[in-house]
Image (cartoon, grey):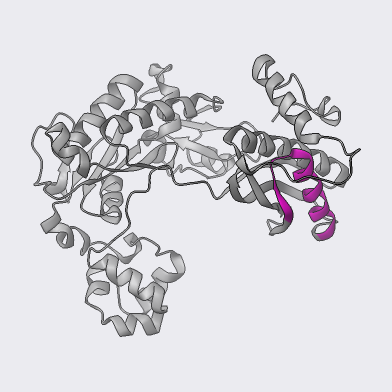
Amino acid sequence: MSRFRVGTGDTSWPDDTGCGLLHVDMDAFFASVELRSRPELAHRPVVVAGAGPRSVVLSANYHAREFGVRSAMPVGAAKRLCPQAVYIPPTRGLYSEVSAGVMEIFREFTPLVEPLSLDEAFLDVRGALKRLNTTPAAIGAEIRRRVAAEHGITCSVGVAKVKFVAKLAGGMAKPDGMVVVPAAETLDFLHPLPVSALWGVGKRTGEHLKQLGLDTIADVAAAPLPRLRRSLGVAVGEHLHALANGHDDREVVPDSPEKSIGAEVTFDVDKHDRGELGLELLRLAERVGGTLRAKGIRGRTVSIKVRFADFKTITRARTLVAATDVAREIHGTAVELLAEHAPTGAVRLIGVRVEGLGSAGGGEQLTFESGAPRWRDAEVAADSARSRYGAAAVRPASLISRQDG
């Protein structure tokens, strides 16, 4: 794959004609952001993680990854693998701030930016090439330069004809590189790779493909489509066959609408008391309701997620008569769901989510109960106070003695 890779400072690259899709991914994002203010740690293993006994690794720099430390790994496991690492607590709000700045750089080149997370996005630059008198790879190189110069972190870029190949190329460019896959060489790039590289192939599907004697992407591309349909199902068989042959019709979708908004918390110590869990649900509902109102959207369905001490996890949902962004309504529904579906047992994690989102512009559901409290008015007033005086300025009385999460 070395013939596709472009290093920092290189001014020439493979033919990028027709390769208008970029995948850009920050390198070890949280850790890189933290290291900007602690350059003395640049050559040491560094892990960003919370301090609680059940915290997981949020980010690990490449020195820590050499010891097997990975994102989402329990901190205890990470410390066993790399006890000499420096463990840094996450800085609230900092990563979103840097992410917003990076995304703004992307949008200077094209409005067609599809964020996948805080540190990753697809860009469609085809419409910008003539306007800027440039090439896709030149845009990728300039993005890498700008991100490093303006934000002090590095990123890796994949350049290709289709999204799937651009994402693969971006992964292979890490760390701090760029991989350009010429359109005419897409299959040369894809076919030597293992089937696990195909988008949508997890452990079970990968094992099934190997049982069929399909070890590489080339094997899947050459397999008769009827055989893949019979063995994997029509949709999966056709999807994997298309990808293996370099076909991916998905467009870059800028700022795709959110499908749900939620919040959850993992407890340092399992909780049994349903009264305490009700207070946690209230705190989470306040966060979700505030986010919905800030975005000007409401949702029709409230769901809870409960993970028990044995790691069994359940989700339960209820659809409301009318869409809401009111924390009191979200909380009331969540408490009912908890009582009905998880009345007993030690709880390790609990979460609240609102789905079925839509614009809040349609007005508020009216009630015939003239004396009913106007809870939304109160919550909007609280939003205003919090925006002026801080998050702790106004909150439900039952949460006053609790620390903000």
Residue 201 in the image: state x and y as whole percent.
Answer: 39, 65
Question: Image quarter for residue 146?
Answer: top left
Q: Is residue 354 left or right of residue 33?
A: right
The verdict on residue 218 being magenta is no
The quarter of the image holding the C terminus is top right
Looking at the rendering, the stretch of residues picked out in magenta corresponds to 320-340
Residue 16 in the image: state x and y as whole percent.
Answer: 12, 46
Question: Image quarter for residue 242?
Answer: bottom left
Decide: is 212 above or below 207. below
| Circle count | 0
Can residue 320 be seen here?
yes
Which secondary structure dominates the residues rendered in magenta?
helix
The verdict on residue 335 being magenta is yes
Can residue 273 be seen here?
no
Q: Is residue 152 left or right of residue 276?
A: left
Task: Say which residue appears at 8% left-offset and 47% top-offset.
Answer: 15
Question: Image quarter for residue 395?
Answer: top right
Decide: is 308 above or below 158. below
Q: Is residue 71 left or right of residue 316?
A: left
In this view, the residue farthest toward the right is: 371
Task: Say which residue appears at 32% left-offset and 28% top-offset.
Answer: 105
Which is nearer the eye, 153 or 370?
370
Which is nearer the eye, 316 or 89?
316
Task: Say which residue appears at 37% left-offset and 79% top-offset.
Answer: 211
